[in-house]
Amino acid sequence: MSIPENLAAILARIDAARKAAIAPAPHTRLVAVSKTVDETGIREAIVSGQRLFGENRVQEAQRKFPQLKAEFPDLELHLIGPLQTNKVKEAVALFDAIQTLDRVKLADVLAAERDRSGKCPRLFLQVNTGEEPQKAGVMPAETETLIAYARKLELPLIGLMCIPPVEDDVAPHFAFLAKLAKENGLGELSMGMSGDFEMAVRFGATYVRVGSAIFGERAKI
Ligand SMILES: *Cc1c(COP(=O)(O)O)cnc(C)c1O
């Protein structure tokens, strides 16, 4: 299947999942995850009408997207991988949203860069719903404190994001994230990948992040 065919199929499946959901979110947007995908592949998706992309490394995105964003002003780019504080300046300049805010220090540096540059991408808190020690994301018990901290800094926090443990049933993770967002007055929920985005839609995802089901399997790095 080609990239345009894959995209059309995914969009149709999102639509169907929304129709089947008891309480679907007001919108569910597809983030086409283009990490490791070259410019040719990204352009195929753009030609098919896709405008929202996700990258998980700042440097890789810097190589691929400035030119594309100049050419397609309505293109929107989200950072979905961990962000180091020494890359904040570049990330703020390039990304429209950062989905991986997960610690006080990063909130501080984002606020300082916002004050310096006068702009700040919209932000999601990444929650480590599986409490995996090696994984990025704020621990569930510390989430409300970090939300309050980001709000005190007047950062544009709009939602929560999670990546459930690979071996787990995803449903409880999605349900938990949705509940946490609701309790904290956050409207956006980024959850669901190639293997489980329909389940995420059922639990109210407003953003699903799909890579390999659009662009094909990635080479293992
Ligand atoms: C790679 C990645 C995805 C997409 O994964 P697929 O299984 O290829 O759809 C989604 N979210 C994050 C954070 C990723 O790093």
Image (cartoon, rainbow, N blue to C red):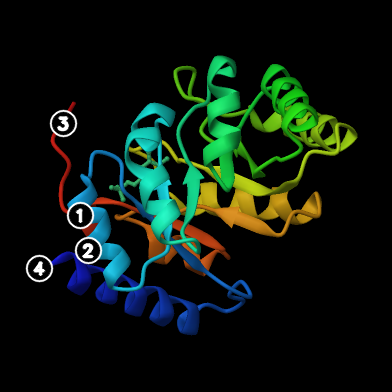
Mark 2: amino acid: Glu
In the image, 180: left or right of 150? left
Task: Name which quarter of the figure residue 109 lies in.
Answer: top right
- Is residue 80 shown to the viewer in this render? yes
Q: Quadrant of the N terminus?
A: bottom left
Instruction: Look at discs 3 and 1 and give the one toward the viewer.
Output: 1
- Is residue 169 shown to the viewer in this render? no
Q: Counting residues from the N terminus, which is met first, the one under dot 1 or under dot 4?
A: 4
Judge: label 4 CB < 8 Å from ligand 1.
no
Q: Nearer the viewer, residue 213 or 116?
A: 116
Q: Which disc number belongs to residue 220?
A: 3
Measuring 18% from the left and 53% from the top, which residue is drawn there? Answer: 40
Give the labeled residue for mark 1. Answer: 41
Q: Position of residue 170 (x, y in %)?
A: 43, 49
The 10 Å Cα crowd at callout 2, few under 14, some 14 to 19, many 20 or more, is some
Instruction: Look at discs 3 and 2 and give the one toward the viewer.
Output: 2
Q: Counting residues from the N terminus, which is met first, the one under dot 3 or under dot 1?
A: 1
Q: Position of residue 33 (x, y in %)?
A: 35, 49
Q: Nearer the viewer, residue 185 or 61?
A: 61
Give the labeled residue for mark 4. Answer: 1
Ligand 1's quadrant is top left
Could you give the CA–CA distance between mark 4 and mark 2, rounded to whole angstroms?
13 Å
Give the labeled residue for mark 2. Answer: 44
Q: Counting residues from the N terminus, which is met first, the one under dot 3 or under dot 2?
A: 2
Q: Counting residues from the N terminus, which is met first, the one under dot 4 or under dot 2?
A: 4
Instruction: Look at discs 4 and 2 and give the one toward the viewer.
Output: 2
